Image (spheres, grey):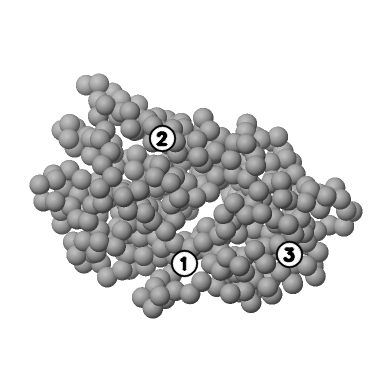
Amino acid sequence: MRPVRKTDAHQTDSLAELVCSNSFRSDDHTANAVGVLHEEMRMCDSLIISTADKHAVPAGGALAVDRVNFSKEITETLDNHPLITIDRTEVTEIPEEWDSVIIATGPLTSDPLADWIKSQTGEEELAFFDALAPIVHKESIDMSKAWMQSRYDKVTAHGNGKDYINCPMTKDQYYTFIEALIAADKMEFKEWEKNTPYFEGCMPIEVMAERGPQTLSFGPMKPVGLTNPHSEEQPYAVVQLRQDNALGTLFNIVGFQTKMKYGAQVEVFRTIPGLENAEFARLGGIHRNTFINSPKLLDGTLRLNNNTNIRFAGQITGCEGYVESASVGLMVGRFAASERLGQDITIPPETTAMGSLINHITGGANADTFQPMNINFGLMPLMDVRNERGKRVKGIERKKAMAKRALDDMREWLNVQDMSDAA
């Protein structure tokens, strides 16, 4: 509906606009669940992932992209597709005559449509809060105090082991920073918003700080795997910034989602060594996400139980994260197309990343306590992995085995699908 109807988080009228260059997260498909999801989407010829690969920028082991060019190409591709018509009119309800509909309105579903969804599903509330991290102009960072390095000097296909800007803190600086975070002025919520919970995986940094003074030093500000070339003293904490565009002129502060007021953000973040004169291309913010109770409302192919003409896709289903949302959309598109063509609909095995997400959304989670979930190995059936001595192994070795199983099973599922389509 943009630009006819704007949202609180988007800045352009382009499709697939990202709020962070690292929205895709890790690209390691050997031992990381989101990396496995990337690879499964590549197998399915995902437009989102293929375009992300094309516009990748250095980010250690992550798949980070030039957000502007990524979104621009997605928009142009869909605009030029002969079977797609883009209508920017806001949809406030689904007309009865629409007999095959996918609702993929995402975390910022407009109030009229959200109200219509609630009326159709009996849901009382659909929302939780998500927060955005600030972005800094690289040239304003004092590199006499900061330095470039990936944790443990990790080199990847898109990086050289020096993909992050690191700003060190002493113990005194760290605790002064924590006190300032907690004391800073915060955005106030409207009365009807106050009971809306945060998503655990995107917690505002000041909320994390309130959980205990050392929380951040064991989280986004952990100093491990880094060596400060400016000092022999080991930093007590480190603030990392990640490249946000292809030119390398913008860097976002990793893990620094925030609901502080703009003035407070500038004051607090400029106490970080190296960021004393930081110029911000975007300050942090907060926006409301919207999702339905999918285990209660949707069937196994994400159709609405009480109106099978309607499917839901993306983050509104209760998956969390850009990659997860896109992957669910990819699957729902396949389900709807198969139904239209009169073909059998099969769901990827729950041993795969895609299958485990759909299983979580449609029944793997308890409807009474359902919350959005990022992809993780905990959603997949565990494996009994043993070493050469027959001893059960866990940790990274089990993750590697589960990753391999997921990709093998996805490959087999797709081969069966291709043979079925050909028949």
Q: Which residue type carries mark 3?
A: Thr
Q: Which mark is residue 56?
A: none
- Label 3 crowd bin: few (<14), some (14–19), many (20+), radius 10 Å: some
Q: Which residue is mark 1?
A: 198
Q: Secondary structure at mark 2?
A: helix
Please tell me whether mark 3 or mark 1 is closer to you in this view.
3
Estimate the spatial distance between the alpha carbons at disc 2 and disc 1, rounded to whole Å: 30 Å
Q: Which mark is residue 271?
A: 3
Q: Position of residue 332 (x, y in %)?
A: 29, 42
Specify the quadrant of the image occupied by residue 76. Answer: top left
Earlier along the polypeptide chain: callout 2 or callout 1? 2
Q: Which residue sits furthest front? A: 4
Q: Which residue type carries mark 2?
A: Ile
Q: Which residue is mark 2?
A: 74
Nearest to the observer: residue 249 or residue 312: 249
Q: Is 281 left or right of 372, judged from the image as shown?
A: right
Q: Secondary structure at mark 3?
A: loop
Q: Position of residue 176 (x, y in %)?
A: 74, 72
Vertical placement of 142 versus 347: above or below? Answer: below
Q: Is 156 left or right of 207, judged from the image as shown?
A: right
Nearest to the observer: residue 154 or residue 180: 180
Q: Residue at x 57, y 68 (%)?
A: 260
Q: Are marks 2 and 1 in contact (CB under 8 Å)?
A: no
Q: Which residue type carries mark 1?
A: Tyr
Q: Residue at x 77, y 51 (%)?
A: 142
- Circle count: 3
Q: Position of residue 347 (x, y in %)?
A: 30, 41
Earlier along the polypeptide chain: callout 3 or callout 1? 1
Q: Residue at x 62, y 74 (%)?
A: 184
Image quarter of the C terminus: top left
Vertical placement of 353 versus 112: above or below? Answer: above
